[in-house]
Amino acid sequence: MKPSKSEDSTRSGLQEGNSDTNDEDKSELCPGFKDVDSFVKYGLGAVLSATKASAGLPQPGDEYDFYRSFPGFQEFCESQGDRLLHCMSQIMQHHGCRSHTRDRNKLTGLEERFDLIVDSNDVILERAGILLDEADGVNRSQQPVMPAGFQPPKIVVSSWNRKGSGSSSRSETFRLLHAKNITRPQLKFKEKVDNSNTPFTPKIFIKPNATKPLPSYFTNKQIRSERPEDLDVPAALADFIHQQRMQELVEDMFAHPYQYELDHLSMPERLLSKPEPQMYKPVAETKLSFIDSLEDLVALNEKLCKLSEFAVDLEHHSYRSFLGLTCLMQISTREEDFIIDTLELRSELYILNEAFTDPNIVKVFHGADSDMEWLQRDFGLYVVNLFDTHQASRALNLARHSLDHLLKHFCNVDSDKRYQLADWRIRPLPDEMVQYARTDTHYLLYIYDCVRAQLLDSNHGQPGLLQSVWNKSKDISLKKYLKPIFTEESYLELQRKQKKSFNTQQLTAFRLLFAWRDKLARQEDESTGFVLPTHMMCKISEELPKEPQGIIACCNPVPPLVRQHVNELHLLVQQAREMPLLKAEIAAQKTKGLTPIKKPEVMLFGPHDTSRVSESDLPPFSAEEVPVKQGVLFSEDEHKMDTDVQTTTTSGLLAPAKITLFQELEKKDAEESDSVAHMKAKRINESFENPFRMYLPSSDVHISKNAKFDPSSKIFEISKRWKLQSIEQQQTELEAKKKAKQEAKEQAKKESEERNKAKQSYQESLQNVATVRQQAAESTKDGGKKRERVVSEAGELTPKPSKKLMKSAEKPQKTEAPPQDSFKPFDYSQSDFKVFTGANSRDNTQFDPNRQSHDFKKKRTPRGQKNNVGAGNRSMSYLSGKSERGFRHNWPKR
């Protein structure tokens, strides 16, 4: 049976009433609160009132103890404490935490309750953070969508890792797409990667669109690469050896090949006039070509040479290579997009130089600073007539200068940066990565038109602002790739960036680890971040672990090469621990002399200020090479020191400053005729520095300082000749002084030998001659026989030694023996022998100190009387006759 109309009406009325009540229930978030805002306001008000009430409670200490003594206050506090504990236990039970906060031991109950509350707070805050992330659209249970065959990566959730959350679409995270177990593309390169510690030399050997021909160094490069004698030498070092053989200029070796063309590049009028922006074609309607063969590359070069502009971008990988790898090149025209596999065509991409260096074709890049270096390093490509949209964005003062912002601003396109940090070595490329790479250049030509139009509009139609962008872009194309070179001071720059203070042991460990990381990265062709990240290297340097396990503990996660070479790293750390531990200031003072210190330019100076003296005026000596003349005591030692200083080899002339402003220069002849005192005085004057030196007219006022160091200038040749002449003059003077010194030594040696020979001959002649005393003693032994006297001239007694005879005896003269027939014996009968027996002789007037002493002993003068006998003629320091050690002289008492 069908229900009646009245029943239907009653049912509909009940349904409407129920629906109204359900809508009211659904509209309320909590009982008594309509929405979240009202609940939050009420909660904040309750917290504020509770805070004020707690501040009004008695302070702990004497005040609280005073109130606690009243029974009513004590009961109130206990009841409120039980209510709070009950409320807290209910909240903890709701979140699944332990909630037994009441029945506790009196001794340890307070500490246990505190620990329970801390653990519960951690759990509740963690759950609140998870709920807030889910409310923001970050779902932790969501699995990332990845290409088939690849392992899903870890998702790093942070504020910078999310897109702007819109009302229609949920926020997405940017993911790092990486792939494991990729075959290293370096193994397939025809030209091996050069990681040696030598400077980079350009790879170009053909120069299309050249107004100045390529130097012979680059044209003969392929021939030199086939030489067998340079196979074991790094490429850059082999090139340097070859240019030394062929006497080629080093400037050509490291110069920019298109420097002349870029310096003389002129912008045509069409590029400085306002263009009509040509709308880009949709991505779905644009043809895409993937180029991985030489034939396709040649066809692409022919297409590009017929165009007036095209856009270029590169994809780079730097984590698993020391210098880095350019993995992909995207080129877009108005009609077509191209993606080039640069890993496969690495050695053939020089063909594109024909289009890249054509000054009539505009190459549009965005942020081409790194792209210019990568093109030179990997392919030998150079760009002429470049336009950088990043520089145009800076000139227009846009909010942001990234390509993402330009796409949104001009094309209203949201670029998907999900694969921005992907590993571009993956082959074959997934479709998602191909679309991302294609987007970077597809819209760039339209942005190029719009940016030029805005630059002219913002400058009231004048091309000045647009010309500045062209000039900045030209400067970017002039950049040269510089290879990272390891030196002993390379670690200092990285250590300064860390902003950490190391002691000597920690700094030594940092230096050794830096050198080890650089060496291993070059050998294995891995980046330094892959071998040992910088933060791990700083951690090891700070901790200086004593065991290899400590090094492993400092790294989380442990790099594979660190785990393989942990013993070698342990030896380096031990070597650093053996260094003496000094303060940073003392270590800085010791290493201060290793680096050259440049004097700051002082604007205010006095007459004794030497900071403005040019470095060319100073002698080219180091602290160890300057010959220092030490102080001497006598003139003979001074001559010896002069000869010693002259024998030392010097690398230049050291001339002391002379005060010659108020006196005339002396001539050489006057200097040679000066006395020793004058020479010493001159030497003292020359040791002082002229305080008026800076006011004297310098010889290089009109000479450029750069010209002195330019080998092609005439000034360099003249100064070089003067230096050579001064060095030759110094060498000749040193040789002359050495020769004079040698001759003086030989002459002194000859004189000493002659003196020794004369003395020896004189002593030999006196050995067989009997003295007068010996003859007298023999006459007494023979029984008083009178000795026969040698007949001499009449009236001649014992001859006195004359001064002439004494002088002649001192001089070595060869005396000839008298002939035997003229010898006559001397008659001693007429001589007085009492002289030899010790008796007093009245006729003898010779002074005898022995006799004087005996006379004093025998004849004593009474007291009070003076003895004036020969008082002025006595010698207390000389005794005639033989001197015996045991003989005691009885000298007169004073």
Image (spheres, grey):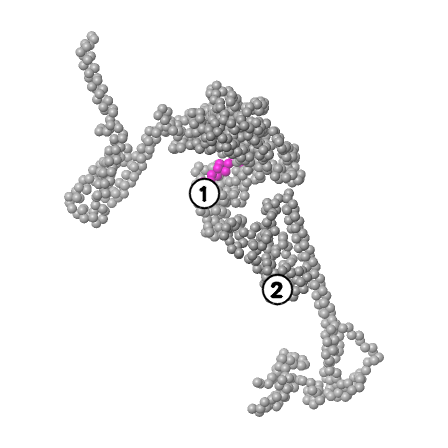
At x 61%, y 61%, the residue is: 663
Image: 363 above or below 812: above
Is residue 532 toward the left or the right of residue 884 in the image? left
Q: Which residue does the numbered mark 1 point to in the structure image?
A: 498
Question: Residue 761: x and y, percent?
Answer: 74, 72
Is residue 65 toward the left or the right of residue 538 in the image? left
* Residue 159 lies in the magenta-colored region: no
Which amino acid type is marked by label 1? Gln
Secondary structure type for disc 1: helix
Image quarter where the N terminus lies is: top left
At x 50%, y 51%, the residue is: 602
Chain part drawn in magenta: 523-535
Q: Which residue does the numbered mark 2 point to in the structure image?
A: 680
Pointer 1: residues within 10 angstroms few (<14), some, or many (20+)? few
At x 47%, y 39%, the residue is: 533
Q: Quadrant of residue 830?
A: bottom right
Question: Residue 190: x and y, percent?
Answer: 59, 30
First in sequence: mark 2 or mark 1?
1
